[in-house]
Amino acid sequence: MTSQLKRPFSPDLDKLLGHAFPVLDDGFVRVVDYMGNDSSIVQAARVSYGDGTRKVSEDRSLIRYLLRHQHTTPFEMCMLKLHVRVPMDTWRQWIRHRTASVNEYSTRYSIAIDRAQMTPADSWRQQAQDNKQGSGGFFDHAQGEQLSASEQELHRLSKDVYQQRLDAGVAREQARKDLPLSTYTEAFWQIDLHNLLHFLALRMDSHAQLEIRRYAETIGEKIVKQWVPATWEAFQDYRFQQMTLSRQEQELLALVVNGQMEMALRWCGEYGWVKQKEDRQILSREAKEFAVKLASFGLTPPW
């Protein structure tokens, strides 16, 4: 005889269904549907051990254990479906995460969304000198105003040209080709919790581009935190705020902690972390990243 099952639900997330959280100047993220909650993760993990294991470990501790030791499949039992509006250039980064099911608004069948992301005068970022894919610092307000004005003119022109083509009967699939990447698109995005946490770990990171970081922060703080609070807590402790040390970093850290700075500096030279060029030192990227890790412990590098 079968017993009736009750669907796991999240009261806090139920309250947010359909609510659009604003992102950037005209973007949004909203929950369309979901499956599972923290208890679903626990249930999936315990099925491997059979009945009677609940007394061994309470739910929160088990979730923290699973995430800490990178047990992934229990988190795949939860699903989240979002409706998002996002600029096309940001969406290009987003869609690289191929572990989701996606259905995007098509400008081949429909007229393009009549909105493009605008950049305020105080938000134009300069190219970073030490990172080819990053930014660093902002332009002054006067330069920013000029950039914003030219951006506005470009948007107006591209919009007019697009509309002229449509009015002339040009096929939508061809009329769209000169739309700027700042044009907003919309999509339904469905992903399991394991892969969602991977997305958030990468896109909430301070090195991620600011625009997609705003979307990731909204999804994490406004949605996932309410949906699976125990998992979110564990994610913050063991994934997002974690620090990893390679074998080489562990060797060098041991030398630094023990005060063997001369030996540590020789080690850096042998492994190519520090090179002497004329009167200056050249640090490898690994050395620079390790220095940041040392600073979090209040330690200084040997160079």
Image (cartoon, rainbow, N blue to C red):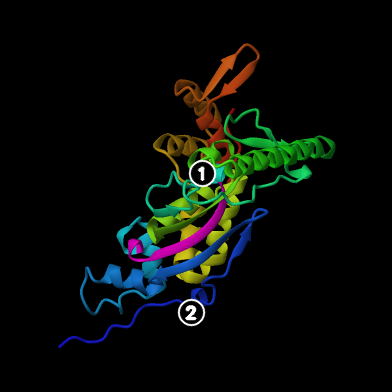
The total of numbered circles placed on residues is: 2
Q: Position of residue 203 (x, y in %)?
A: 52, 49
* Main secondary structure along the magenta-highlighted residues: strand
Of residues 243 and 155, the one nearer the viewer is 155
Q: Are marks 2 and 1 in contact (CB under 8 Å)?
A: no
Q: Quadrant of the N terminus?
A: bottom left
Is 104 placed above or below 49 here? above
Is 78 placed above or below 158 here? below
Q: In this rendering, does residue 202 appear at all?
A: yes
Q: In this rendering, does residue 297 appear at all?
A: no
Q: Secondary structure at mark 2?
A: helix
- Taking 166 as reference, is 53 left or right? left
Q: Earlier in the sequence, mark 2 or mark 1?
A: 2
The amino acid on which the numbered mark 2 sits, given as a three-letter code, is Pro
Of residues 215 and 300, the one nearer the viewer is 215
Tell me which residue sits at (68%, 54%) in the image: 25
- Residue 172 is labelled as 1
Residue 259 within the magenta-colored segment of the rendering: no
- Residue 91 is labelled as none
Q: Residue furthest top?
A: 278
Q: Residues within 10 Å of mark 1 (few under 14, many from 20)?
A: some
Is 45 placed above or below 54 here? above
Q: Position of residue 98 (x, y in %)?
A: 39, 47
Q: Which residue is mark 2?
A: 11
Q: Which residues are magenta?
A: 75-87
Q: Which numbered disc, 2 or 1, marks the residue closer to the eye? A: 1
Q: Quadrant of the C terminus?
A: top right
The amino acid on which the numbered mark 1 sits, given as a three-letter code, is Arg
